Amino acid sequence: MALIGGYFVIRGAQRQADAAFAAAQAQATAAITAAREQAAAAIAAAQRGADAQLDVMRQTFRDQATAAQRAVRRTAYTTYLGAVDQARAAQLTWNANPTTATRDAWNTSTRAVGETLNIVRLEGPPAVTTAAEALAAAIDPATAPALSVGAFATRHTDFLTAARTALEP
């Protein structure tokens, strides 16, 4: 009888051990699954953070490129306006005192306008280029005499408006 009783005790203990092993295995599996999910969540969060940083860097680079482009354009436009103003002064001097020297000065200054106009053409945009070309025609010795007195002022204002629009953020 003791033998049968011992058998049931051993069987019961084995069942308890099997159940404890199964429970431990289930806990280990759950812990491993939870750790994997936490690791995946951490990786996803890190990826989102890295993507956000990349987006910020990309936007910063775009903003810097736009600012640099505006600075180059602003320099081109102001250089062009300086050349136009010098040519306009030479034109007015020639109109007041038409001599060979004043005509040569006007021609020389209009060449400078042409050179700076090429830079404006390169930098654009088309609206500014069109306004700059119209302004250059207002002081060109070949076309200026046919223009009305207010044409220079109107074209100057048109150029300034187009340039300011191109330089706005």
Image: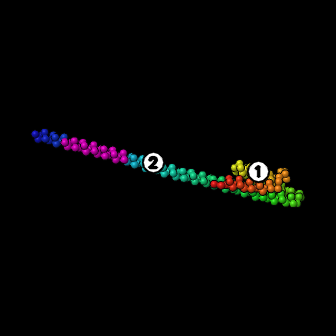
Q: Which residues are magenta?
A: 12-34
Label disc, if present, on residue 44 of the rendered structure: 2
Residue 156 is inside the magenta segment:
no
Picture disc at residue 133:
1
Residue 52 vs residue 127, the one in the foreground: 127
Q: Is 132 left, or right, of 31 in this rendering? A: right
Q: Residue at x 67, y 56 (%)?
A: 71
Q: Residue at x 83, y 59 (%)?
A: 92
| Pointer 1 local density, CA inside 10 Å: few below 14, some 14–19, many at least 20 | some
Give the structural element (helix, strand or loop) at label 2.
helix
Where residue 132 sits: x, y (%)? 75, 52
Percent coordinates x, y for residue 113 in the rendering: 78, 54
Q: Residue at x 39, y 46 (%)?
A: 36
Residue 119 visible somewhere in the drawing: no
Magenta-highlighted stretch: main secondary structure?
Answer: helix
Helix, strand or loop under label 1: helix
The residue at the point 23 percent across, 44 percent down is 17
Amino acid beneath label 2? Ala
Left/right of residue 30 with respect to residue 149 in the rendered view? left
Sequence-wise, which precedes: disc 2 or disc 1?
2
